[in-house]
Image (cartoon, helix red, strand yellow):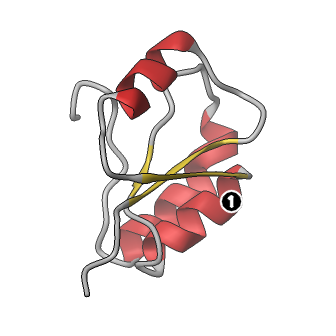
């Protein structure tokens, strides 16, 4: 049986753009978590997407990005770069 895609979101930092992007994804499970946990779950293959358009700093995401990339994933901007 195929599971529903799991979309991870910030527990405390959201904005209208992020909420609109998530709302456009039907048939998904939305799960709020802290940043480091979100990256770890994606790297482990236990979640599918972390959506965040609210501002963030490199020191908040650098370690998580390294873990995701080491697992074969990618961290992209809203423009896909």
Q: Quadrant of the N terminus?
A: bottom left
Which type of secondary structure does the marked residue at label 1 adopt?
helix
Query: Residue at point 74% right, 52% down?
Result: 34
Seen in the picture, residue 47 relative to 59 is either above or below; the reply is below
Q: Quadrant of the C terminus?
A: top left
Seen in the picture, residue 34 relative to 6 is either above or below; the reply is above
Q: In x, y percent, where is residue 53?
A: 48, 23
Query: Residue at point 64% right, 30% down?
Result: 57
Question: Which residue is situated farthest in the top direction here?
Answer: 16
Question: Which residue is situated farthest in the left direction here?
Answer: 80
**Numbered circles on residues, count:** 1
Left or right, residue 75 beside residue 53: left
Q: Quadrant of residue 21?
A: top left
Name the residue nearer the viewer: 14 or 76: 14
Query: Residue at point 54% right, 71% down?
Result: 41
Left or right, residue 65 beside residue 70: right
Q: In x, y percent, where is residue 5?
A: 35, 62
Q: Which residue is mark 1?
A: 36
Left or right, residue 18 beside residue 54: left
Seen in the picture, residue 50 relative to 81 is either above or below; the reply is below
Question: Which residue is situated farthest in the bottom direction here?
Answer: 1
Left or right, residue 58 beside residue 73: right
């Amino acid at each position: 049986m195929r599971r529903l895609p799991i979309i991870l979101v910030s527990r405390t930092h959201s904005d209208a753009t992020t909420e609109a992007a998530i709302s456009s994804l039907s048939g998904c499970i939305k799960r709020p978590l802290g940043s480091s946990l979100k990256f770890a779950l994606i790297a482990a293959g236990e979640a599918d997407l972390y959506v965040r358009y609210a501002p963030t700093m490199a020191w908040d995401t650098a370690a998580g990005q390294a873990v995701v990339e080491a697992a074969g994933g990618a961290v992209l901007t809203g423009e896909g770069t």
